[in-house]
Amino acid sequence: MAYTYKHVIIIGIDGAGNFYRNTDTPAIHKMFEEGAGSDFCLTSIPTDSSECWGSMLIGVQPKVHELTNGTIGSTEYKHRAEHPTIFRVIRDAHPGAKLGSFSNWSPINTSIADSGIGIVKRSANDESLLIQICDFIKTEKPEFLFIQFDSIDGAGHTYGYNTERYLQELNVADGFVASIRKAVAAAGIEDDTLVIATADHGGNGHGHGGPSDEEKYVFFAAVGKTVPRGKKIDVRVIDMPAIVAHALGVPADPNWDSTVPEGLFE
């Protein structure tokens, strides 16, 4: 029987691609050393935030979930009954689970994360959000927590992806990863927690949305007691719901395109 984690945390860094390799990011590098991952995790296309975060949380391709940057701020995800989010799948299996969605980019909370099922939602700038995240982990010990930091993507749009100013922001985000892992340890739940760090997309020039390697490949790193150390795996952003469900021991939705990557868990 597979080991069941009590907690799963996804740290999503918007627009980070796999550019962590080009700057000082000790926390992300440590996750690769202590766990399994990939520098070429394939995201959804078009490589825009709505499409990619949607696939990460719903487990289907953009043509199925139909979320776009042009509509996400004004409408709820409309295919919830047929293609539920990972939040809904966990809630149905574990009615008393503590769930959280802490996102700088508020449309994730208003349009993707389900309303009315008891998800604790917070939206704020990255620095304020980090404080709330660490407090939430230590006081509530959530079964599932989804996190989205946004300033890195803003730096890419403003200064260009993989530029010096962009990489400075990525270094700051790496510090967020370190702080979150320290909060997990301080909460006393490290041994029972799967921590994942990843991105929705990368960027090319000052934008994204296209199929270039710089846009469609992102990093993925996972650390947990059943995750082999230092292993490279084949993984996609769309696989995230299946990974979370498997880790928590809840049934995956049969309509997901999401699968658990081979070799991620021992």
Image (tube, rainbow, N blue to C red):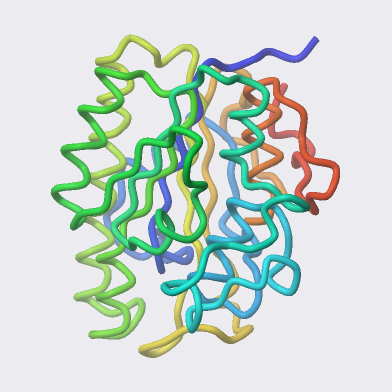
Quadrant that contains the C terminus: top right
- Direction bottom: furthest residue: 205
> Is 218 placed left or right of 83 in the picture?
left
Pick the front one: 195 or 96: 96
Pick the front one: 57 or 201: 57
Residue beneath the point at 31% across and 41% down: 177
> Is 200 placed left or right of 43 in the picture?
left
Residue beneath the point at 40% across and 43% down: 101
Quadrant hosting residue 179: top left
Relative to 7, say whether 90 is above or below.
below
Quadrant that contains the N terminus: top right
Q: Position of residue 63 (x, y in %)?
A: 74, 74
Q: Position of residue 53 (x, y in %)?
A: 53, 61
> Is 226 placed left or right of 185 in the picture?
right
Relative to 133, say whether 28 is above or below.
below
- Direction front: furthest residue: 116
Relative to 173, say whether 47 is above or below.
below
Residue beneath the point at 19% across and 75% down: 165
Pick the front one: 172 or 130: 130
Exactly how many numbered labels are in the figure? Answer: 0
Residue beneath the point at 67% across and 23% down: 93
Quadrant hosting residue 164: bottom left
Relative to 125, say whether 84 is above or below.
above
Pick the front one: 262 or 143: 143
Q: Position of residue 116 (x, y in %)?
A: 48, 40
Quadrant hosting residue 132: top left
Q: Position of residue 146 (x, y in %)?
A: 44, 42
